[in-house]
Image (spheres, rainbow, N blue to C red):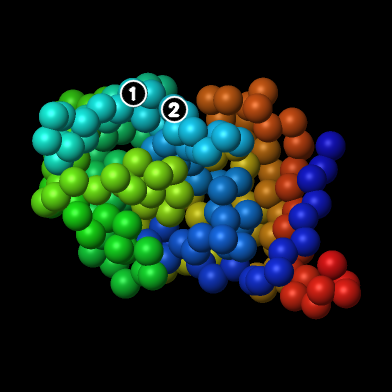
Amino acid sequence: AVLRLAATVANNSFDPAQLGTGNAVQYWQPVYVNVLVLDTESQLQPSLATEWSYDDSMTELSLTLREGVEFTDGTPFDAAAVKANMERVATGSGSNAYMLANVASVDVVSDTEVTVTLSQPDRGLLNYLATVAGAIASPASFDDPELATEPVGSGPYVLNKDESVAGATYVYERNENYWDVKSFPYDSVTVTVMEDATAR
């Protein structure tokens, strides 16, 4: 089965520090997994983080991470990857860096535990971790000059660069190593840029 989507705008970038929201999510959601996800009722659900809790002051967030996840380049997903991604978004020039503006530090407790310390309570943070601020890429890809066009995530799909045309068509093939394959029934996903409303 193939899922074919028509998009109203072209993809701006696959660089996790530059990801867009709204009409841009269909490009990066196939390849990147978030720390948390929102279900169809907008309720937070586990994803790369299986458990989360705040302290009484609401300024220290503890995350317990999923084990056994690997990025498509073979790099293991762990607490260091979460720290690297969050710090990169927070200090980057992307339009959504504000989502992590209240993060004072991200500390690795163990391979599967992260503590996020805030400068002040931020009731939006958990939702942000279910969108751009929580999209996790392989830290090994950060120095790759092609990152904007060649994403390296741990998502249910992998971008087929040979079949894709930047700004026009994006083709994604199933990632057979994804930890929750059963939730994604499509063998491939194609997103075609169709800015003209009549054409869509």
Instruction: Answer above or below: position of 87 versus 64.
Output: below
Q: Bin the neighbour count of mark 1 within 10 Å (Cα to Cα): few under 14, some 14-19, many 20 and up.
A: some
31 on left or right of 73? right
98 on left or right of 25? left
48 on left or right of 121? right
Q: Residue 10's spot in the image, x, y percent?
A: 64, 71
Q: Residue 81's spot in the image, x, y percent?
A: 30, 42
Q: Which residue is mark 2?
A: 46
Residue for point 80% across, 52% down: 4
Quadrant of the rendered structure where residue 126 is?
Answer: top left
SS category of the residue bearing label 2: strand
Instruction: Answer above or below: position of 184 versus 73.
Output: above
Say how many tags the image has: 2
Q: Quadrant of the N terminus?
A: top right
Q: Bin the neighbour count of mark 2 within 10 Å (Cα to Cα): few under 14, some 14-19, many 20 and up.
A: some
Query: Distance of mark 2 from mark 1, alpha carbons?
Result: 7 Å
Q: For the residue marked with disc 1, what is the amino acid?
A: Glu
Q: Which residue is mark 1?
A: 51
Q: Does any portion of residue 60 appear in the rendered image?
A: yes
Q: For the residue marked with disc 2, what is the amino acid?
A: Pro
Q: Are marks 2 and 1 in contact (CB under 8 Å)?
A: yes
Residue for point 49% across, 63% down: 20
Residue for point 84% across, 67% down: 200
